[in-house]
Amino acid sequence: MSSELEALRNQLRAAQRREQEAERLREEEQRLREEAERLREYERQRYEQRTGKTTLPEFLDACHNHLCLGLTIQPDTTQSTQGDAANADNKPRPDRILPWPEFDAEQARTWQDLMDSEFVLERHFTSLHTLEESGEAVRRRQMGSELDLNSFARFTVEDLVSQIIERFSKDSVLCHRFGIKGAVKFENHSNTLSPDRTTEQMQSLSISDNPRRSERLRAHANKPGRADSPKPSKSAMKSSRPRADQFCVYNTSGEGETEHRVAALTIEYKAPHKLTLGHIYEGLAEMNLDEVVEEGENESVAIRCRRLVAAVITQGFSYMVKAGVEYGEIYTGEATIFLRIPDDPSTVYYSLSVPKGDVGASTGWDERGNLSVSTVHCMEAF
């Protein structure tokens, strides 16, 4: 009897163990199903994140990482364009070149205004996947000429800035906050500034009915003592108009033949093998041009770099004066020198932006990052 009872007990324990094992298997199966579901959801979200529209911070971060850092300078100098980086002869020039002390604070205020808006949470911009693929194409090209730089700038900065401003212009809050009146266009030719202007006005670059400071700057350009000369011929007028590689133009109203454009700033490209970061770091500083233009014997590298940078800024200054704009840029792909001519046109102010140095290899935008000094944001805010 006792043996039968023990056998029953063993059978009961075995049944309990089987039930426990079955329960364990059911729980494990449920866990695996839930894990598979979590993985599918993660992959779905990751796919949507990579292929869907991005927010402004995500977009700027990807532009910096995949596009702006993709600049590769042609290492073989024999395969690069030759010549001087600047020609400042017979051009209006400032008396002084000074740092622009308010620039960083102004950029920071603009960035904070953006971060305080609901706009930064909205998804309007190019996908991460597309920007990554575009970045691969950028990295395969080597920079060896001004034409290469133009293409790089259009692909990695200008088209992106235009895209951002276009979205801003559709947001009434941002339009009111930043005074946005239309889209921004980057044009290669000075004669596209206003299609309803005559050839004579294109030659003299009378850009609009209300050019920004144009009367004052044009007076400075024609100031006696700097370039006294008889009245130029039509050909001379044409050749003396600003020849910056591109103009940034506000498209304020209308389309096609009725489109009205007002010049906002000039951009002068300098190939990075001609105006290197070394030249800029060594030569960009506060200076009195009367002390810089005179060449001396046995000059140091620093003095020669300072003269080169002064000549480049003078060229940019000349274009700004002739175009009647307050703001301008010198762009090398590696660096941007932002310029401003204040009420006193004898002085030009500068601020240097080097994204790889200012931002680094990563913007860290999701923490306390450096997106506010990335190339695309600096251009868009400028």
Image (tube, rainbow, N blue to C red):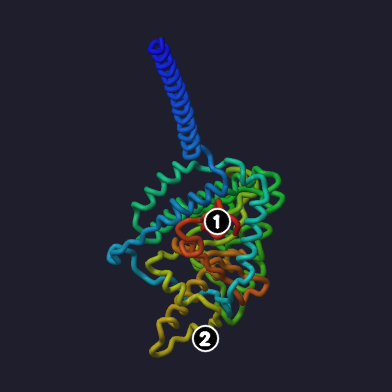
Q: Is any atom of residue 80 visible in this view? A: yes
Front position in the image: 304 or 123: 123
Front position in the image: 249 or 353: 353
Within-10-Å neighbours for mark 2: few <14, some 14–19, many 20+: few
Q: Position of residue 19 (x, y in %)?
A: 45, 18
What residue sits right under mark 2 in the picture? 291
Disc 1 secondary structure class: helix
Is residue 326 depicted above or below 20 in this figure? below
The picture quadrant where one finds residue 210 is bottom right
What residue sits right under mark 1 in the picture? 371
Contact between labelled residues 1 and 2, with CB atoms less than 8 Å apart = no
| Residue in the image at 61% along x and 65% along y | 104
Q: Position of residue 99 (x, y in %)?
A: 58, 74
Disc 2 secondary structure class: helix
Most extreme residue toward the bottom, as rendered?
Answer: 297
For the residue marked with disc 2, what is the amino acid? Glu
| Residue in the image at 56% along x and 77% along y | 97
Numbered mark located on residue 141 in the image: none
Front position in the image: 338 or 19: 19
Q: Position of residue 283 (x, y in %)?
A: 47, 77
Q: Earlier in the sequence, mark 2 or mark 1?
A: 2
